[in-house]
Amino acid sequence: MVTSGFGVGYGVGATQALLTVSGLKSVTDYDLYCAAVTSAGVQSVSADVQSSKLTVTTACCKLLTYTNSPSYVYGSLSKYTSTSPAAQYVFSYTLSSNPATSVTITPVVYNSFGDIVSSAELSAVPASTNFTSASTSLTGTYVLFGSALVSGSYFVTLTPSGTNVAQFSPTISAAVSVLSSDSIAPTPP
C-alpha cells in the first residue's frame, strides 16, 4: 500500500500494525498486500508481498440520494412546457457507486396516511430504472403523472430491489405537494 500513499510506522520487534485506508467504495472487493520497508530502505521481497494477499470487502452501504426533489408539482404534466425548467417537476437521484451486478430503483408513491397510491391516481414515470455494474450513468429521474384534478400531500420513496439490493441503504423519501391544474403555484421562499 506504500505505493498507493498509505503506510504506517512500526517499532523494532513489532509483529503487527494497524493501517487505515480511506477513499474506498462501499461493498466492494479489494486485494490488499503487505510489504515492509526498514529504516535502512530494505524492502520485502516480491514473493513475500504476493503471499500476503488478503481479499476484503468493504462495509455496507452504497448510498441512494435525491439530487432534486421539487416541493410541489402539478399532477398533470400538461402544465409544463418545453421552456419549463426541469428542476420544477423532474425528480432526480444518484447512486454513490455501481452495484456489483444489478439493482433496480423503483419510486413508490404514498399518500399522507402512508398508504400506497394507485397508479391510476398518481404514478412515477418511468416506473423503475435498472443500474448494472457497467452503467456509465448512476443518475435516475422520474416525473409524477396524474390527472388535472389530483391534489394533496404525498411522499415518494426510492426502493431498491434486485440482485444487489443488500448493497444499498434502505429506502429514502421525498415529500411533495401535488397541485391540481387550476391551482396557483405557491410563491417561492
Image (cartoon, rainbow, N blue to C red):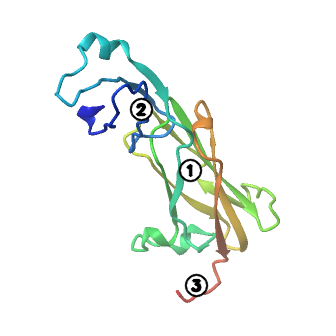
Where residue 85 appears, as percent x and y from the top left, is 42, 72
Where residue 89 appears, as percent x and y from the top left, is 52, 69
The residue lying toward the viewer, choosing from 64 and 40, is 40
Question: Which residue is located at x 46 percent, y 47 percent?
Answer: 96
- The image quarter containing residue 124 is bottom right
Element under label 1?
loop
Give amino acid for label 2: Ala
Seen as rendered, the residue at the extreme front is 12
The residue lying toward the viewer, choosing from 16 and 80, is 16
Q: CA distance from mark 3 to mark 2?
A: 61 Å
Q: Tag 2 or tag 3, which sits nearer the N-term?
A: 2
Where residue 150 appears, as percent x and y from the top left, is 71, 71
Q: Residues within 10 Å of mark 2 (few under 14, many from 20)?
A: few
Give amino acid for label 1: Pro
Direction from residue 61 to residue 173 in the image, left or right: right
Q: Tag 1 or tag 3, which sits nearer the N-term?
A: 1
Which label belongs to residue 179? none
Would you name the residue on which mark 1 appears? 126
In the image, is residue 114 above or below residue 136? below
Would you name the residue on which mark 3 appears? 185
Q: CA distance from mark 1 to mark 2?
A: 51 Å
Element under label 2?
loop
Would you name the residue on which mark 2 appears? 17
Give amino acid for label 3: Ala
Question: Which residue is located at x 34 percent, y 24 percent?
Answer: 34
The residue lying toward the viewer, choosing from 90 and 20, is 20
Q: Tag 2 or tag 1, which sits nearer the N-term?
A: 2
In the image, is residue 106 above or below residue 187? above
Question: Which residue is located at x 17 percent, y 28 percent?
Answer: 40
Q: Nearer the viewer, mark 1 or mark 2?
A: 2
Quarter of the figure that contains the N terminus: top left
Direction from residue 64 to residue 87 in the image, left or right: left
